[in-house]
Image (cartoon, rainbow, N blue to C red):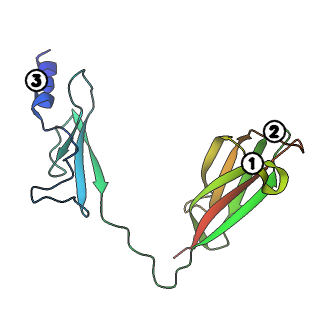
Amino acid sequence: MKKLFLAAVLFALAPTFSAQAGFPPSGGPVTTGNLYFCVGIYSWPLVPNVRQVPNATSCVPKLEFLQTINLTPPTPPPPGASVTMVCETENTGADGSFNIDALCPSNNVALGGGYLCTTEPGLGGNPAPVAPSVNIFFGASPPTGWMTVGKADVSGSQAGFGSCRVCATCEPNQ
């Protein structure tokens, strides 16, 4: 019980995350480098469980884990790198179900992807609400495409089925 009380006191006295946490004493937001947060493993009412700390070794062992946010902008792509988008469009089943893979060209890696469904074939009609069950990268590491499986609400379709398009953003594998 003493350990639990001591841990609660340590958390209560620790500086907590606030709207000012990302600002150094000199003012202005931090735009490069890392922000470090210690997250409490246990949570007690009225006791903060996240605090910003100055370095990666400031967390209390066995009571907190470190969460790092890297603010350094990503390295720009090399000159001549070309990002392309590949899309696959298919009609849904009568119940709106679909399973579509958008595959990148050979020797390309998928950077991301997404989907769009409509209430009529050929991407006509209105956008249809979708309940995706799978919306992830496709293929081995590195990913080679984007895959979406789901069910679109095509209840307003005059044709009795709708259409969905799944796209992958691709870049040559360097």
Pointer 2 residue: 156
Pointer 3 residue: 6
The kind of residue tagged 3 is Leu
Going from N to C along the chain, the mark reached first, 1 or 2, is: 1
Crowding at dot 2, Cα within 10 Å, few <14 / some 14-19 / many 20+, comes out as: some
Measured in 3D between alpha carbons, the distance from the residue under mark 3 to the one under mark 2, in whole angstroms, is: 61 Å
Which residue is farthest top?
Answer: 1
User: In the image, 73: left or right of 132?
Assistant: left
Pointer 1 residue: 126
Measured in 3D between alpha carbons, the distance from the residue under mark 3 to the one under mark 1, in whole angstroms, is: 59 Å
Q: Position of residue 19 (x, y in %)?
A: 23, 44
Q: Using the rendered view, name the quadrant where residue 37 is placed.
A: top left
Q: Using the rendered view, name the quadrant where residue 8 is placed.
A: top left
Quadrant containing the N terminus in the rendered view? top left
The kind of residue tagged 2 is Gly
Secondary element at image label 3: helix
Crowding at dot 1, Cα within 10 Å, few <14 / some 14-19 / many 20+, comes out as: some
Secondary element at image label 2: loop
Going from N to C along the chain, the mark reached first, 3 or 1, is: 3
Crowding at dot 3, Cα within 10 Å, few <14 / some 14-19 / many 20+, comes out as: few
Q: Position of residue 71 (x, y in %)?
A: 30, 60
Q: Is residue 77 above or below residue 14?
A: below
Residue in view at x 70 percent, y 45 percent:
149
Residue in view at x 14 percent, y 26 percent:
7
Measured in 3D between alpha carbons, the distance from the residue under mark 1 to the one under mark 2, in whole angstroms, is: 9 Å
Secondary element at image label 1: strand
Which residue is farthest bottom?
Answer: 80
The kind of residue tagged 1 is Asn
Decide which of 62, 171 is in the foreground and name it: 171
User: In the image, 147: left or right of 4?
Assistant: right
* For the residues bearing labels 1 and 2, Cβ distance under 8 angstroms: yes
Decide which of 89, 4 is in the foreground and name it: 89
